[in-house]
Image (cartoon, helix red, strand yellow):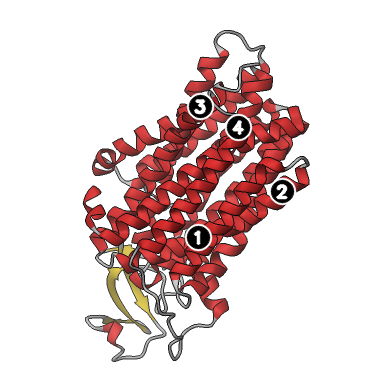
Amino acid sequence: MLTVLRHRTYRRLFSAQVIALVGTGLATVALSLLAHDIAGPDAGSVLGTALAIKMVAYVGLAPVVSALAHRLPPRPVLVGADLLRASVACGLPFVTETWQVYALILALQAASATFTPAFQALVPEVLPAEADYTRALSLSRLAYDLEMLFSPALAAALLSWVTYTWLFTGTAAGFLASAALVLSAALPTASRKPADGEPGFAARATRGTRLFLATPRLRALLALTLAVAAGGATVMVNTIVYVRDHLGRSLSDLPLALGTYGAGSILTALLLPRLLRRAGERTLMLPAACATAGLLLALAAATRAAPGGWAWPALLITWAAFGATGSLITTPTGRLVRRSAAPGDLNAAFAAQFSLSHGCWLLTYLLAGRLGAGAGLSAAALALGAVALGAALAAWRLWPAPDPGRLTHTHTALAHGHPHLSGAHRAGNGWRHAHVYVIDDLHHRWPARAAAD
């Protein structure tokens, strides 16, 4: 996996991504503490709304940026987004009202929704070899997991020396360092002109989503993502309320709880390559979604009981389990997307996955924050457990078993002699053949009675 870092340009881009992730991790801890200072016991509601604003920016802007990215030079897009994120981070320590938090978070996440799809679209251009691109995707997933472990630990160390507002300074420094690394990398500079017959903007912006919704395993992936988001939203939104208000523990325990979640995720990610060699994605991901639902329902029951000496270690174990089940689902996601899209559609497919998955997080962030503040932590965990259970059951139904890549199918709309029909044989009023099946310009819908070949 690490061999891809021998590529100088990608090494700098990956370093920029990692540094920005660390800065974002510091901001996550600091934002939780800021919300608690402003809203007290209603911090979960404030944080949930702030994170929901992030998701709105991601869901609304990611497909648009993906459709435009192939025409815009990547360097000014990436550097401009980093500079805007650094400016917003510098302003967060000075807010005193919740509306100010929301306004700055909207600006910050709009910049992130610009940066991330542009970065994802650039990587396959920098690493055209499929094997290198695959390693880069795996390395990126590991970077996200490491950030969940490292950033809370770094935040805990810094909080022993400075107040939490200084964590926003670290966030700004991370974005500035990311911009500097992007500036130092050798990137494509010319804008690409639209080709004759190229789909229009609207078609490009929706292509990945149409591909996602037409592919059974990707529809199941969307349901699985909703289950992951139900558990992850509980951690990201209500950890501060569990630690400070439900258990009455100190601020220094907040990074420990978040770090435990990251530790469960990264340990699972390290074990997954071996697990995937023994079992397919479906075998691992579907039970993980059911386990997430079970954890949430158990958390709802435990929260109703009076907290005792068992409550803190139980919370840490539950948070680590949330990290493990989430990693079991999110880490193989790239494999499913790559298997389900033609090479020319990979960028659109990953942009759709980015947008649709954050739509799931938007829903669960709102549920975790609003229900946690209005109806209590137990009610929030119960509702999210029901969401996760419904999503897991939907995924079982949507994802066919077996799920081969190569399918025998019939074309009825292509004329005899079309290059795609080479090797096909006549079958009724169409032409029948087999190949690795993906949704593209020649295959608009999944075969109703596809057969494995």
Which residue sits at x=40%, y=47%?
18
Q: Nearer the viewer, mark 4 or mark 1?
A: 4
Q: In the picture, residue 33 is in which quadrant?
A: top right
Question: First in sequence: mark 4 or mark 3?
Answer: 3
Q: In the picture, residue 119 is in which quadrant?
A: bottom left
Judged from the image, the secondary structure of the residue bearing numbered disc 4 is loop
Amino acid, disc 4: Tyr
Image quarter (top left, top right, bottom left or bottom right) of the C terminus: bottom left
Judged from the image, the secondary structure of the residue bearing numbered disc 3 is helix
The numbered dot on residue 22 is: none
Residues tagged 1 and 2 counted as in contact (Cβ below 8 A): no
- In three-dimensional space, the C-alpha distance between marks 1 and 2, rounded to whole angstroms, equals 20 Å
Question: First in sequence: mark 4 or mark 1?
Answer: 1
- In three-dimensional space, the C-alpha distance between marks 2 and 3, rounded to whole angstroms, equals 25 Å
Which residue sits at x=35%, y=82%?
428
Amino acid, disc 1: Phe
Q: Which residue is mark 2?
A: 102
Judge whether residue 212 can be spotted in this image: no
Q: Which residue is mark 1?
A: 115
Question: First in sequence: mark 2 or mark 3?
Answer: 2
Return the x and y of residue 350 as percentages of the image width and height.
44, 61
Question: First in sequence: mark 1 or mark 2?
Answer: 2
Q: Which residue is mark 3?
A: 156
Q: Is residue 211 above or below residue 428?
A: above
Q: Which residue is mark 4?
A: 164
Amino acid, disc 3: Ala
Which residue sits at x=75%, y=34%?
38
Question: First in sequence: mark 2 or mark 4?
Answer: 2
